[in-house]
Image (tube, rainbow, N blue to C red):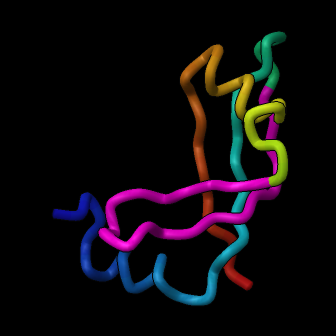
Amino acid sequence: MSLFSERELAYLRGERLLGRLATVGADGMPHVVPVGWSLDETGTLIEIGGRNLARSKKFRDIARDGRAAGQPVDT
C-alpha cells in the first residue's frame, strides 16, 4: 500500500525526473542541490541516485543528521 494518494502517484509518475534535495550541513546551514529521482515500482519510495552518491555531501549530511526534504521540479 502506498503512502501517496492516487492523485500524488499520478503526479509523481509523470515526466518529472528532476528535483531538489535539501539537507542540513555540519555547520547547521541548509544545503540544496538538484537531484535525479524515480518512483519505485511499488509506488512507495522515491529513489534518489547519482554518481558516487555515497561520497556526496548530501549523503554525508543525511547519514549524520537524518533530516532531508525533497521537491519534484516541474519541467
Which region is colored magenta?
A: 30-50
On the image, the x and y values in percent for residue 26 come to 79, 12
Seen at 61% across and 59% down, the residue is: 71
For the view shown, which residue lies furthest in the left direction? 1
- As displayed, is residue 1 above or below residue 50? below
Seen at 34% across and 69% down, the residue is: 43
Can you tell which quarter of the image residue 42 is in?
A: bottom left
Is 39 on the left-hand or right-hand side of 19? left
Along the line of sight, the residue nearer the viewer: 74 or 56: 56
* Residue 44: in magenta span: yes
Seen at 77% across and 54% down, the residue is: 50
- As displayed, is residue 20 above or below residue 66? below
Seen at 63% across and 80% down, the residue is: 16
On the image, the x and y values in percent for residue 53 come to 76, 42
- As displayed, is residue 1 above or below residue 30? below
On the image, the x and y values in percent for residue 57 come to 83, 30
Position of the N terminus by quadrant: bottom left
**Magenta stretch: dominant SS?**
strand
Is 24 on the left-hand or right-hand side of 56? left
Is 37 on the left-hand or right-hand side of 53? left
Q: How many marks?
A: 0
Position of the C terminus by quadrant: bottom right
* Residue 40: in magenta span: yes
